[in-house]
Amino acid sequence: MKRKALLAAMTLGVALVVTSVTVTLDASETHLQIQNDPVTRNRPGIAEQCVYFDPRTAHIGHFPDRRGSIELVVAPLRTLSRFENQEVAARSLKIVKHYGINELCIAANSKLVYMLVSGKAPVGKVPGEKYVTFEPHELRAERIANEWRVLDGKSPLLSFGSDESAARQALRVIKYYGFNAKCSTGGDKGFIFLCALPKPQGIEKKPYLEAKVVPGQ
């Protein structure tokens, strides 16, 4: 089935450009069999398109013909994100290599773009980066002042304008993959990604020591 696709999603600050692709693979085939073309996968309640790449090919590209554009590129020449300065680009490259990110996906009917490591959420923190954590199963999609948002309590986590279906689809993606943290490198307009942070183990509670009662005291 031949389809022309242009996936340019800026909700998470990540740009993916795909042209004239052939989608013939299904979710049962592994990423090792995919030649870096977008494929459609069906998850419970989610239809997503993903591009697979080797994180070892990730590098910073400078393109004078694009007004001095600084871009995070993976082979064969796919732009993951564009940056205003070299520092943010370098930090973003570090993130991709730290996690070993090898998939860039977008959920159908949603503006949500997310990165995966062989079909799973990136796990853990990158040293030096700040994270906003949330409980995925407590999130909700709600319209606030004519804008659909994914909310963490009263705090907006993601915004989707007037697109209700995009907000609800994004919510399903977050819950399915167990994303529980958002990181933004370079501010809200920088390189933003979702990941899963291990929950800290609770402190083991030791039973109280009962005082021995000595007869006659």
Image (cartoon, rainbow, N blue to C red):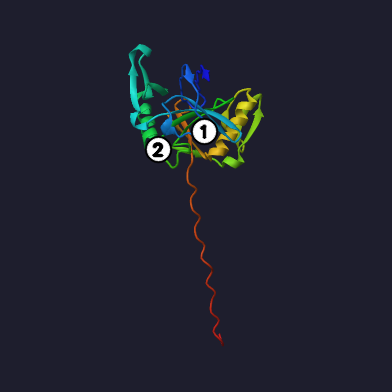
Distance in Å between CA atoms under marks 1 and 2? 22 Å
Residue at screen point 57% across, 40% down: 136
Q: Is residue 62 left or right of residue 186?
A: left
Image coordinates of residue 73 in percent, x first then y, are 37, 24
Image coordinates of residue 128 in percent, x first then y, are 38, 38
Instruction: Inspect the image, locate mark 1, and give the three-letter code of the amino acid beneath it.
Output: Ala
Residue at screen point 53% across, 20% down: 1
Q: Which mark is residue 27?
A: 1
Instruction: Kindly check if marks 1 and 2 are in contact, taking CB atoms under 8 A apart as contact.
Output: no
Q: Secondary structure at mark 1?
A: loop
Q: How dense is the environment of label 1, judged by Cα within 10 Å: few (below 14), some, or many (20 and up)? A: few
Residue at screen point 48% across, 50% down: 200
Instruction: Inspect the image, locate mark 2, and give the three-letter code of the amino acid beneath it.
Output: Tyr
- Hey, which quadrant is residue 35 in on the image? top left
Instruction: List the residue tagged with mark 2.
Output: 99
> Which is nearer the eye, 141 or 29?
29
Which sits earlier in the primary sequence, circle 1 or circle 2?
1
Q: Secondary structure at mark 2?
A: helix
- Hey, which quadrant is residue 118 in on the image? top left
Image coordinates of residue 52 in percent, x first then y, are 43, 29
- Establish if 8 lies above or below 180: above
Residue at screen point 54% across, 74% down: 210
